[in-house]
Amino acid sequence: MASRMTYVLTAYIEAAMTLANYDKLEDGSFAGEIKRLPGVIAFGKTLKQCEAELRSTLEDWILVGLRLGHGLPKLAGIDLNERPHARMESSQNSGKFLRGKGASDNLRA
């Protein structure tokens, strides 16, 4: 039996989507939200469209949160706030960085 690889971000999104709540509105459209994730809300004419919009909103919410350094809630044991830390080493004589976070880290005055 072949194992299927699951990425951390995909697992987080799937865990969040299991927490989604949907309501049918008076006009027949749908509203969806994930209460544990503030601001993750979407609307659609059909339940399927609402779910797709909610997933898209969730993906954007995660990316913006990570980019801005917001703490994201831990879901299903997944903590997206934990980042692998790149080691920054300098060679003794050359002063060049072997690894860094970005190009500006390698600038010298």
Image (cartoon, rainbow, N blue to C red):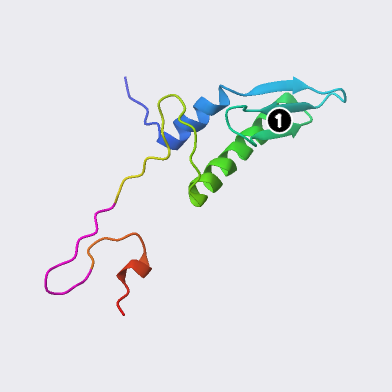
Name the residue furthest left: 93
Q: Quick one: quadrant of the C terminus?
A: bottom left
Residue 49 on image: x %, y %: 71, 31
- Callout 1 environment at 10 Å: few (<14), some (14 to 19), or many (20+)? many
Boundaries of the magenta span: 86-96
Q: Which residue is depicted at the point 21% across and 71% down? A: 96
Q: Which residue is depicted at the point 74% across and 28% down? A: 31
Place residue 5 in its image quadrant. top left
Place residue 97 in its image quadrant. bottom left
Place residue 98 in its image quadrant. bottom left
Whether 46 is drawn above or below 80: the answer is above
Please tell me whether residue 91 belongs to the stretch shown in magenta: yes
Nearer to the camera, 11 or 40: 40
Q: What residue sits right under mark 1 in the picture?
A: 50
Whether 43 is drawn above or below 101: the answer is above
Residue 56 on image: x %, y %: 62, 39
Name the residue furthest right: 27
Q: Which residue is depicted at the point 48% across and 48% down? A: 69
**In the displayed structure image, the side of residue 53 where residue 26 appears, left or right:** right
